[in-house]
Image: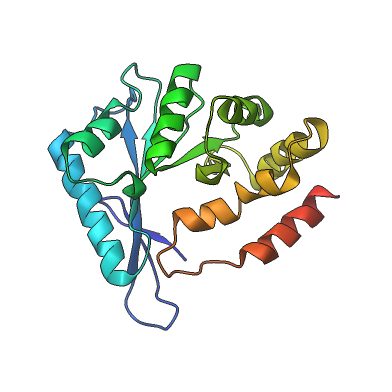
């Protein structure tokens, strides 16, 4: 079970029964009209502290960012990487399909080492999956999620099925975005699930 505490850090009980361990932080809203962007130096401290906590507990220690529709898009994340001692691998941006411009910036962020995420709320995953690949996005740096507060896992399965069956994307490439890539984004010695088993479960669900 995950526990989200007030400052945004995400904890999970240690499997051996020890104290809770740091998995990451988020989601931190940026370029979003519902919240002001954090000060860059404060955000750098949060990202660094989260990484250090993950390193000490042998967990991912990544910081998740909710990207809104603002014109600055991923500028704040680029500032973190360019001007502070922050590695792109410590950053994970979601909701990257707000616009083509945002998607292209997310593709560049992925090439620096960050993971980026497409949600399936708007039920247009095939369109954005194709755009991501056609514009040079690294398949191994992309994940796909439900945005669970709005849509259910069934919507995710429907969108994955559409990519594979209707649009003929390779099944291994699509499934990796909800299994192996998600695992890689959150691991540092933390084996949260067996990716081979998840491939099998999803393949059976898609075949129904």
**127 is higher (above) or lower (below) than 82:** above
**Residue found at the very far right of the displayed protein:** 208
The one nearer the camera, 113 or 188, is 113
User: Can you give x and y, in whole percent of width and height, for residue 198 in the image?
Assistant: 67, 61
User: Can you give x and y, in whole percent of width and height, for residue 9 in the image?
Assistant: 30, 55
53 lies left or right of 11? left
12 lies left or right of 153? left
Image point (40%, 43%), residue name: 114
Color encoding of the figure: rainbow
Q: Is residue 191 visible?
A: yes
User: Can you give x and y, in whole percent of width and height, for residue 35 in the image?
Assistant: 28, 28
The one nearer the camera, 69 or 87, is 87
**118 is higher (above) or lower (below) than 54:** above
User: Can you give x and y, in whole percent of width and height, for residue 113 in the image?
Assistant: 39, 44
Q: Is residue 26 visible?
A: no
49 lies left or right of 62? left
**Residue found at the very far left of the displayed protein:** 41
Q: Quadrant of residue 190?
A: bottom left
Image point (32%, 43%), residue name: 88
Image point (40%, 72%), residue name: 13
The total number of labels drawn is 0
The one nearer the camera, 146 or 150, is 146
**39 is higher (above) or lower (below) than 61:** above
């Amino acid at each position: 079970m995950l526990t989200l505490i007030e400052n945004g850090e995400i904890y999970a009980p240690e499997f051996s029964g020890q104290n809770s361990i740091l998995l990451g932080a988020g989601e931190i809203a940026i370029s979003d009209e519902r919240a002001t962007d954090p000060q860059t130096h404060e955000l750098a401290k949060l990202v660094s502290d989260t990484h250090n906590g993950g390193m000490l507990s042998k967990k991912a220690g990544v910081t998740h960012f909710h990207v809104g529709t603002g014109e600055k898009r991923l500028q704040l994340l680029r500032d973190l990487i360019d001007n502070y001692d922050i590695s792109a691998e410590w950053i994970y941006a979601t909701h990257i399909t707000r616009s083509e411009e945002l998607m292209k910036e997310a593709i560049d962020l992925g090439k620096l080492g960050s993971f980026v995420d497409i949600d399936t709320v708007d039920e247009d995953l095939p369109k954005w999956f194709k755009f991501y690949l056609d514009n040079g996005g690294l398949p191994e740096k992309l994940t796909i999620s439900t945005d669970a507060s709005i849509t259910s896992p069934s919507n995710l399965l429907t969108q994955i099925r559409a990519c594979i069956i209707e649009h003929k994307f390779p099944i291994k490439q699509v499934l990796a975005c909800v299994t192996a890539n998600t695992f890689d984004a959150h691991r540092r010695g933390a084996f949260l699930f067996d990716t081979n088993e998840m491939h099998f479960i999803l393949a059976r669900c898609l075949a129904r």
